Amino acid sequence: MATNNNFRTCPDTGLQFHRPAETLMKVNAVAGVVCMLIGGIMGLGVGLTRWPAVHFLPADAFYLALTSHGINILIFWLIFFEVAVLYFCSSTLLRCRLATPRWGWASFALMVIGAVMNNVAVLQGRSSVMMTSYAPMSADPMFYLGLILFAVGALIACFIFLGTLVIAKAEKTYEGSISLVTFGALTAAIIAIFTIASGAIILIPTFLWSIGYINSIDGLMYRVIWWAMGHSSQQINVAAHIAVWYAIVGVAFGAKPLSEKVSRFAFLLYILFLQLASAHHLLVDPGISSEWKIFNTSYAMYLAVMASMIHGLTVPGAMEAAQRKRGLNKGLFEWLRKAPWGNPTFSATILSLVIFGFLGGISGVMMGTEQLNLIIHNTLYVPGHFHATVAAGTTLAFMGLTYWLLPVLFRRKLILPGLAKWQPYLFGLGVTGMSLFMMAAGTLGVPRRHWDMSFSGAALQHDFPATAFTMMALNGMSAVLAVVGGGLFILLVVGSLLLGKKLGEDEKLPEAIIAEPVSDYHGIGIGRVSIPGTLTLALIFLTVFVLYYFVNWKYLGQTWGLS
Amino acid sequence: MTTYSTTGKTNWWKEPIESVELIWIGLVVVWGLIMTFMMPYWHVVGKQNLSNESYKTKPEVYLKKAEAMVSEHTVRTIGQQELPVVAPPVGSDVYLVARLWEWWPALELKKGQSYRLHLSSLDWQHGFSLQPENINLQIVPGYETVVTITPTTSGELSVVCNEYCGIGHHNMIGKIFVTE
Ligand code: HEM
Ligand SMILES: [Cu+2]
Ligand SMILES: [Cu+2]
């Protein structure tokens, strides 16, 4: 191991931080939060514009804000934070020095330059092309170049992560296999490398086209390859936030996985099967056969869906088992009732899990069915779905982890803990509302990425049902709630970093922030079922899923005949 | 050994699997198979499937075909723009043009009859969204999609564009009239 003053041991958790890695984690996380702030402000503008009675922004500003919202929050916020997670899961969790911190800085610099360049291009107003930038609509060359530089930076970070795993193995800094959390991060990194390669294949030619070196870009080819990146990058988010779920049930409850084998296998399924599922973005595209669509959405996607459903059982299952082992073994739900609901790390995580599963998961599988996609493609149903997955699922999980990292990594005490208690609920409620109301509006036909559902300046008219307008008003109110919740998070984090009480290197917090590990799971549960509460919830989930799935076939069956 | 600890066992793959996990995996596999089955099943018994018939085309070529149809079957015009309304023969090939920022022409169809609807864009990507039926198709320039449609409702329907296509996107509305 390297010289010891290059490391510090956290007095509360016993985790060992490699100082250069620690600094890199901090800067990446902070950069992420800055992008979240920009993206959130844009989100507010978008949400208020789509509230018909408010109709806040003019059309050009709306499309600009929506482009900026998508890119800053989906790409920049999440990936900056994921880089911090990768460094944490390798260097810190494996007690190992980070491979080449210098390259870590190169990676960070590229990502910052790329993000700034892209933001400048978008703000100049000539690149309001949405984050998907579907060719042959074109943006300023800086727009693509910014994204490419950002991606190269992220790619370097992935290789630093892999390099750190290699060093840890060679220097024997850990025993046995890498932990489940690190394994989850490894899954995310592998998928990220595939994703960025696909991104390069499509964005580099598009960039060359925007500066005139290439004559044309085929729109369909663009979509197929763009979604190989666009879809898999969502899988990075899922793998990363599930690794965070496991980490949090580990630190908060001392939980171990029910069985390592199952949880690891589920991560492996992501790597094996999700890449192909980009098909579900192309279900109503021309030139693609039904056989290809069905193969890729069933074989490839349902195995990955299965993986998520496994994690959806094993994460709360591990928590239940650990709680029961600690004595909360009564009835079905004592373990859940007596959970630390006032601890934002915990509440953010459990909300992330529930909203991701019930809203994001079920709606995603429904939309990803070849024929059912016909009744929701490009309607507001789609943003309804993915706010449940990335805004609630990934963002809330990362928020929960951030609360925990404030003392552990940043050595600062959280300011205003009384407000922090409420923050995950505010944000969670806002996003849940947005998700449900956008899905409802989408079911009524309201298009996504659309400035004016009342078509005031159009030559011909269409009237959406009055309920659709109500849904959009409710969506606007939920958006305000979500922005208040998200803004509060940024306030608490930035406030703590600047004003929170500094913790000395060896100063312990008054309360424990890491639970004693449980040794085994013997003698818990009801009868032979070790985790009856989680099983009950899982069965309720499956019932809702099945009903909702078939209701949509019924809707489809009522529309015009198509063949 | 917790989810994150560095002192792992090396033999985790030999440990037995929790019975709850096995039950759950079993259920999930069965459900996945049912969902896999539904898609081909609907191709056989369902009435809403895409034929996936499509061709590569060029904007000029596609526009010519649409213009030929319009000059032959226009029955009236609507709106200040005098958008032609075309009543094509039952069962015929019907061409709908998507371009910045209109659907051209408007169509008049008969309820319960089938038509081969062709869709393509002359410029950027657009989204065919038939309201209030809520049928949605992606339109990509250079590709001509063909779907056989059979209206089961009558009245005035709208074609809303639901793929972002620039600053006039929200004004891009077309019309399909269905007569009894
Ligand atoms: C702060 C709360 C948020 C508000 C008020 C908000 C609002 C919205 C609204 C209303 C739309 C749909 C607009 C349309 O299609 O016309 C949208 C799109 C989107 N949102 Fe959010 N959102 C929030 C948070 C998030 C978060 C946390 C993420 C991701 C981590 C996210 C990712 C996206 C993406 C990727 C789009 C699609 C952009 C596009 O169509 O190109 N949003 N947002
Ligand atoms: Cu359009
Ligand atoms: Cu459009």
Image (cartoon, rainbow, N blue to C red):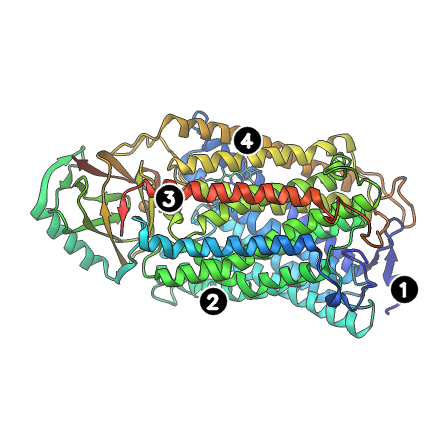
Q: Position of residue A47 (x, y in %)?
A: 50, 34
Q: Tell me the kind of residue under disc 3.
A: Ile
Q: Which residue is mark 3?
A: A375
* Whether labels 1 and 4 share one chain: yes
Classify the position of ligand 3 by quadrant: top left, top right, bottom left or bottom right: top left
Q: Earlier in the sequence, mark 3 or mark 4?
A: 3
Q: Earlier in the sequence, mark 3 or mark 2?
A: 2
Marks 3 and 4, how far apart in space? 25 Å
Q: Quadrant of the N terminus of chain A?
A: bottom right
* Whether labels 4 and 2 share one chain: yes
Q: Which mark is residue A4?
A: 1
Work out whether residue A235 or residue B71 is closer to the camera in this orientation and state it: A235
Label 1 chain ID = A
Badge 4 residue CB within 8 Å of ligand 1: yes
Marks 1 and 4, how far apart in space? 50 Å
Marks 3 and 2, how far apart in space? 31 Å
- Quadrant of the rendered structure where residue A155 is? bottom right
**In the image, which is nearer the foreground, mark 3 or mark 1?**
3
What secondary structure is found at the residue carrying circle 1? helix
Q: Which mark is residue A201?
A: 2
Q: Which mark is residue A478?
A: 4
Q: Position of residue A83 (x, y in %)?
A: 67, 57
Label 2 chain ID = A
What secondary structure is found at the residue carrying circle 2? helix
Q: Residues within 10 Å of mark 2 (few under 14, many from 20)?
A: some
